[in-house]
Image (cartoon, rainbow, N blue to C red):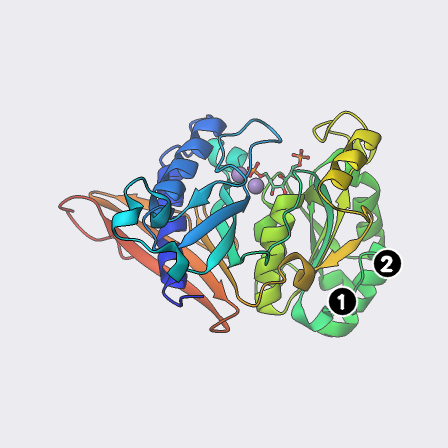
Amino acid sequence: MDATLGLEIIEVVEQAAIASAKWMGKGEKDTADEVAVEAMRERMNKIYMRGRIVIGEGERDDAPMLYIGEEVGICTQADAKTYCNPDELVEIDIAVDPCEGTNLVAYGQNGSMAVLAISEKGGLFAAPDFYMKKLAAPPAAKNHVDINKSATENLKIISDCLDRSIEELVVVVMDRSRHKDLIAEIRAAGARVRLISDGDVSAAISCAFAGTSIHALMGIGAAPEGVISAAAMRCLGGHFQGQLIYDPAIVKTGLIGESKESNLARLEEMGITDPDRVYNAEELACGETVLFAACGITPGTLMEGVRFFHGGARTQSLVISSQSKSARFVDTIHLSEAPKYLQLK
Ligand SMILES: O=C(COP(=O)(O)O)[C@@H](O)[C@H](O)[C@H](O)[C@H](O)COP(=O)(O)O
Ligand SMILES: [Mn+2]
Ligand SMILES: [Mn+2]
């Protein structure tokens, strides 16, 4: 995969984050999402690549989407034949969440970001728009913790691997009624719980970085977000496991189809023969090369949010590459018109 792609995708997430941040606090989640989608699409279509969206969003709540199967990259443009030879280009698959945490943006809360993951064709698990039970943990606990073990057992393992007491550990859990028993168990084990209303991609990836005060993500979130999280965790050497949840009775939101039976039929149609399989990061993002990019929309654990100033904006992004084995934090000043000053922080 072309190494310059790693630089271009920074601009893709930056443009999506800036567009969405203009709608921060306006209470309009669909607009905050829609403008991020459009900005992402516009910038992606300027990249000399042959891309295909394998994970978009929208099915779940009719959000505007970069739809699954959509071709992106300059070679897909109407007049492309004059300057593009698609046969020269590697086909790549792209998973996007242009506005991860639409509610967070709409209500001016922390933790939203524009995010995507890229790999060669077939390198990312084309997850259905279902839910996923997730377990993320620091690199030191990789392959020691297990999603099939209880939260109590996993906390003991993380505590041993990090050489810290269970009382010092913080577990992020989405604040949903389906997690009532899980939250009680984590607290009973002695660990502390950070409840989040949205944004479990950021929580999963934060487990890989010491100093974030996040030592695990447990519970059920969306499956597409699980694949994106797995792409980053694979590159970072963190632990990530995901198991599809197809039974609406477990999720309790009723947003994943009518019945367990119809969901199972849908999975079979998609070629998923073992619906209960537990996937690890290397299986969810199995490509030889994996790239991940995110840009903060509102302030978060890993990145600052977009800061506007007269004539421009400042962004902070994170680009992770399995190719260059790097996690790069990128701080960018964007100038839109003659600025009165440049914002330093
Ligand atoms: O918080 C999230 C919302 O993502 P988005 O729709 O892109 O703004 C994600 O991080 C979660 O993984 C997930 O979408 C959420 O858990 C869906 O569950 P629920 O709200 O309980 O239906
Ligand atoms: Mn999302
Ligand atoms: Mn989203």
The residue lying at 35 percent from left, 49 percent from top is 75
Relative to 154, does residue 309 appear above or below in the rendering? Answer: above
Badge number at residue 141: none
Of 263 and 225, the residue lying toward us:
263
Q: Quadrant of the C terminus?
A: bottom left
> Disc 2 beta carbon < 8 A from ligand 1?
no
Among numbered discs 2 and 1, the one appearing first in the sequence: 2
Q: Quadrant of residue 333?
A: bottom left
Residue 287 drawn at (x, y percent) = 59, 63
Q: Which residue is mark 1?
A: 158
Q: Nearer the viewer, mark 2 or mark 1?
A: 2
- Whether residue 227 appears in this view of the structure is yes
- Considering the numbered disc 1 on the image, is that residue within a helix, a strand or a loop? helix
Q: Position of residue 146 (x, y in %)?
A: 80, 61
Residue 269 location (% of width, % of height)? 74, 38
| Quadrant of the displayed image that contains ligand 2 | top right
The residue lying toward the viewer, choosing from 254 and 199, is 254
Determine the secondary structure under disc 2: loop
Task: Name the residue carrying label 2.
Answer: 149
Q: CA distance from mark 2 to mark 1?
A: 12 Å
Residue at the image position 63 percent from the left and 62 percent from the top: 286
Quadrant showing the N terminus = bottom left
Q: Is residue 163 left or right of residue 20?
A: right
Q: Amino acid at mark 2?
A: Lys
Q: Nearer the viewer, residue 71 or 86?
A: 86
The answer to whether mark 2 and mark 1 are in CB contact below 8 A is no
Residue 190 sits in quarter: bottom right
- Amino acid at the residue labelled 1: Ile
